[in-house]
Amino acid sequence: MKKKIVSVVLAMCTCFSLVACGGSNSGADTQDVDSTQPQETQGSAEEGLVMPDGYDETSSTIYNEALGEFYSAYQTALAATNVSERYALEAIAEAKLMESAVTVPTETQYGDYGMRRTAPRTAPFVAWGTDYERYHNVVVTKEIITAEDQTEMKQKWAELKGTGTYEQWAKDFLTGKGYTLKDSYTYAYTADPVTWDDLATSLSADHEAIIFTYDGLMEYDCEGTLQPALAESYEVSDDGLTYTFHIRPGIKWVDSQGREVADVQADDFVAGLQHLLDAKGGLESLTYGVIAGAQEYGTGATSDFSEVGVKAVDETTLVYTLVEPCTYFTTMLGYATFAPLSRTYYESQGGKFGVEFDSSAADYNYGKDSNSIAYCGPYLVTSATEKNSIVFKANEAYWNADNINNKTITWLFTDNTDPTKLYNDFLDGTIDSCRLTSESLELAKADGNFDKYVIVSDTNATSYTSFYNLNRNAFYNFNDSTTCVSTQTDEDKARTNAALNNVHFRRALSFAFDRGSYHAQQVGEELKYNAIRNCYTPGNFVSLAEDVTVDINGTATTFKAGTYYGEIMQAQIDADGVKITVWDPSADDGLGSSDGFDGWYNVDNAKEEMATAISELAEAGVTIDAENPIYLDLPYPSEATVYANKANVYKQSLESAFDGAVVVNLVDCIDTTTWLYTGYYTSYGYENNYDLYDLSGWGPDYGDPKTYLDTFLPDYDGFVTKSLGIY
């Protein structure tokens, strides 16, 4: 049976708040803010779409043609045993991914104007996992914090980073400046959790809520240091294959009413890993090749979970056995993949393990709502009303209850239909942080708030991209055949499929996409380049710890210690003669960056690539000109002004570059929920109802570029490969 692939993160956030990568929700680390082919065989709307005959074979053929070079280079990288060499080879592989133009990066999160009552850098500071969404220690004030004070606090954070003293300094600084600290935090959100089972989902809208309900073995603090959480200590064997964690004694699991249901013990992590592998919610493959036996159990090669490398030696001693030494293993602990599960509570809700697992069983209730999970984290969910609000109250049984700053966290739903609502809600104190849209930016300037309070947020590690569907089979939404219906004829469909499977056509579209104007619809002209990202893995995500020599097109090339990932990626792209700039050494005040400039948009390059595509496709019998254009469907929700404006810019960019040879059909999904069903909520590539899709992206799960590149693996192993219409 094929593994079900779930959707990746989406860029729906419009509230300037606390969170880093990943998000369909709201927050941003206090650092920053946001919260905003072959014709298919189709069943009825009730049945959904049926996998086309020969789908796997077609997927493999398309993958090998479009991404074969990437895959080959990536396998070479994965075989490297030296960490710095692996980074360099991963950068070369990503260069091939960018050159394939199956996707074009659009932006990252933040890098825009906002205002807040939250102290910068008081949420966990980390680029990967989900710890950045833990807001119990965010410092919040009753008054709006001035831009001047925000800047001074960030500078002090850089000075104190790693000392463990910044949070207290921030409190002292703010009170000394006359601010009043409060013990609650309220912000806007845009997508309700689909499930409350953190081990059975990879949707950010789920993780952002559930993260408040449990602790992990270890967690990152606001200075980016990994600290003990449910595990008070750990040891690693000399061969790097065995990690032994010692669980804090006396910690309690409670229900949503705060009633004790069990003790937290080592076995909860054993139960958690088995449930993760049973549920197949999309994160299980993160353990494949890492935890001994996990892949064999998860793929059904064995049904004996005792062969998986996780054991509870006693109530407080947990041991993981790895397949091979993994330099980034502890960075994975801040993600849901290694979340605990109260075995007894899970079973009381109808949960079973192994071959007996069946989430569709009549008596299976675990995670169906916030009242059907056990809690060992800082908060209990006291109310959750769909498209209204979610309220998190402090868990009195929490092991570290005396050290949380916020006793209440409240989510308030927004549908993004009013581009000034969040700004007005922020001013009247309804929410504690907000991102400025182009409309609210003008209000802030008019009412005098801009100069005093508005800051530019930092960008983070989440990468949003626009995908090209190389194997489109759906021409209406898989859950409802009456929604987002394409107007393309059968001939149009075949021609579009042929064009999108030509690399030069895809590059032409990518070079013609004016991403600055596109992003300006959300943040305004002044900041339109700030959050533009030019590659998938941020160029400064990792750097070399030592000198490394690798082969670039037959030339032995040495990169010095300290060289950033993006610089190596650029070297391979330049050697291949593809006119993409993913790394600018002068960006970020000379530190170098892959963000803050548009290294793709160039109409001359677009026309050059299109001329090549037209010539090659003509040989295949496909004529492309103004009388015979290629039609591309781009879904969007007209109810959300920002996204409607962005869709129109996308359309105008492509159409104006090619003199009528390309026509973009804007498919109005009316509301954002219907928009999500064109691609975000799909499980397989054949369900994707678009030619162009700008809704999804990826936030890293751990501290290695592999966390990004794995998402483009074939054979149902890559989380985002299905966005290309395959697998």
Image: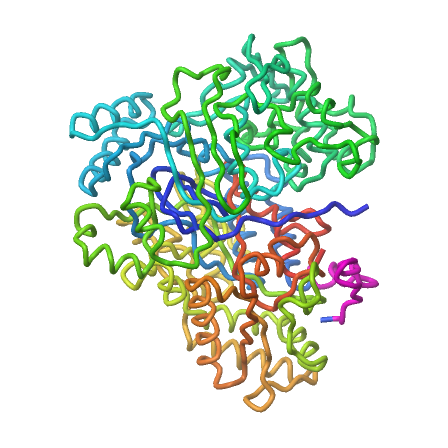
What kind of colouring is applied to the model shown?
Answer: rainbow
326 over 281 or under it: above or below: above
Find the residue positioned furthest to the bottom.
627
Residue 616 visible from this viewpoint: yes
Q: Is residue 566 left or right of residue 480?
A: left
The magenta span reads 38-64
* Residue 330 drawn in magenta: no
336 over 341 or under it: above or below: below
The image quadrant where one finds the C terminus is bottom right
From the top left corner, tell me how far across and down residue 520 is, in percent: 35, 63
Residue 64 visible from this viewpoint: no
From the top left corner, tell me how far across and down residue 546 is, in percent: 44, 36
From the top left corner, tell me how far across and down residue 699 is, in percent: 51, 44
Quarter of the image holding residue 692? bottom right
In front: 512, or 380?
380
Residue at 16% x, 53% y: name it. Answer: 448
* Residue 50 drawn in magenta: yes
594 over 625 or under it: above or below: above
Count of picture labels: 0
In front: 113, or 129?
113
621 over 245 or under it: above or below: below
Residue at 55% x, 33% y: name it. Answer: 210
Q: Is residue 42 left or right of residue 82?
A: right
Quarter of the image holding residue 305? top right
Residue at 35% x, 37% y: name it. Answer: 30
